[in-house]
């Protein structure tokens, strides 16, 4: 890994990353501040949820909504937090090589005494580092925040929930990196990765309603990260391993493509 390039990537992405980090903290804080109201209205909410459309309950995995873990799983981990991790991942992945080509700075970058694989691997590591920092931010926000609203949640479950977001973020970071390496266009890399993320989310969300979708759950990154409900059951280490191995394979394909592709500005 080229340390100067690694630091430059972090510097270039710092403003956008700071914005997403602030947004993450704000969303978690707001949802935590609402929980005392949910808990105090538990009886009324339980009655309401019984009459709530069964389809929506299944889509958003609304199980034990009035408990701390159940509330956080529904309000944060079913959609909002995965969205942030995926947005950061796809953004950094699309920027890895495609941004350099669109800015016509790829030739200059490739004249450095660093091989193409090393350049891309450095950018990949920077994107993974961003995901790890997001995990730490989320973990600390939850670890501190739940104490203010009296939610009982083991540290291991907080860490599992935080890490589940990174599994998604890294997977779609790898996908965006691959598309950028193939096509050299940021819009294609970003759009393609986001399209796959949306498709994955829809299949995961609708699987409880459409039984034929169960057949693809085993290859769905959302199932790998969220299927076991990490705030309650922890990470599924089999699925987590599959997620990591898939990302490594996609990163390897990105390096192979970039090494052999003709880049001309």
Image (cartoon, helix red, strand yellow):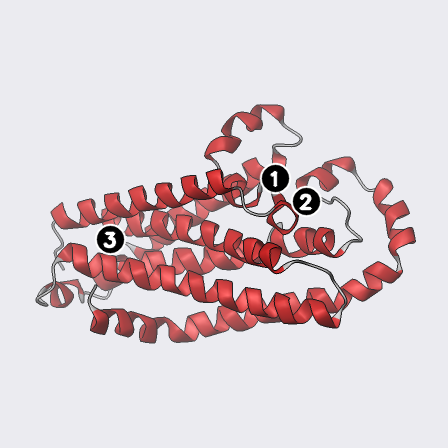
Left or right side of 13 for 74: right
- Mark 3: which secondary structure? loop
**Is there any visible trace of residue 144 in the rendered image?**
yes
Q: In which quarter of the image is residue 169?
A: bottom left
The Cα atoms of the two marked residues, 2 and 3, are separated by 36 Å
Q: Is 259 placed above or below 35 here? A: above
The Cα atoms of the two marked residues, 1 and 3, are separated by 32 Å
Q: Do the numbered discs 1 and 3 sit on residues whose CB atoms are within 8 Å?
A: no
Q: Which residue is drawn at 60% across and 69% down?
A: 141
Left or right side of 197 for 117: left
Residue named by callout 2? 60
Q: Earlier in the sequence, mark 1 or mark 3?
A: 3
Q: Residue at x 82, y 60 (%)?
A: 38
The spot of residue 85 in percent (x, y) is: 49, 58
- Mark 2: which secondary structure? loop
Q: Which of marks 2 and 1 is nearer the N terminus?
A: 2
Q: Which residue is drawn at 21% across and 49% down?
A: 255
Q: Earlier in the sequence, mark 2 or mark 3?
A: 2
Residue named by callout 3? 184
- Mark 1: which secondary structure? helix
The spot of residue 253 in percent (x, y) is: 24, 43
Q: Of the residues tagged 1 and 3, which is closer to the observer?
A: 1
Quarter placement of the N terminus: bottom left
Residue named by callout 1? 205
Q: Is 249 placed above or below 29 here? A: above
Q: Do the numbered discs 2 and 1 sit on residues whose CB atoms are within 8 Å?
A: yes
């Amino acid at each position: 890994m080229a340390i100067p390039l690694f630091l430059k990537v972090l510097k270039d992405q710092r403003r956008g990353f700071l914005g997403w980090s602030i947004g993450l903290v704000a969303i978690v804080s707001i949802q935590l501040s609402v929980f005392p109201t949910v808990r105090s209205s538990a009886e009324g909410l339980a009655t309401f949820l019984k009459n709530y459309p069964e389809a929506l309950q299944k889509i958003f995995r609304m199980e034990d909504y009035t408990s701390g873990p159940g509330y956080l799983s529904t309000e944060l981990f079913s959609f909002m937090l995965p969205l942030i991790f995926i947005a950061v991942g796809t953004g950094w992945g699309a920027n890895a090589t495609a941004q350099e080509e669109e800015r016509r700075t790829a030739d200059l970058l490739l004249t450095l005494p660093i091989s193409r694989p090393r350049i891309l691997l450095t950018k990949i590591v920077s994107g993974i580092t961003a995901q790890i920092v997001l995990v730490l931010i989320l973990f600390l926000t939850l670890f501190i925040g739940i104490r203010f609203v009296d939610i009982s949640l083991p540290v291991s479950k907080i860490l599992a929930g935080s890490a589940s977001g990174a599994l998604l973020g890294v997977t779609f970071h790898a996908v965006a990196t691959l598309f950028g390496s193939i096509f050299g266009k940021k819009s294609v890399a970003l759009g393609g990765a986001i399209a796959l993320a949306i498709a994955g989310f829809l299949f995961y969300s609708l699987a409880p309603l459409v039984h034929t979708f169960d057949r693809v759950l085993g290859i769905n990154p959302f199932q790998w990260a969220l299927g076991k409900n990490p705030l309650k059951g922890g990470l599924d280490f089999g699925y987590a391993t599959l997620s990591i191995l898939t990302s490594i394979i996609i990163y390897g394909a990105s390096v192979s493509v970039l090494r052999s592709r003709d880049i001309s500005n």
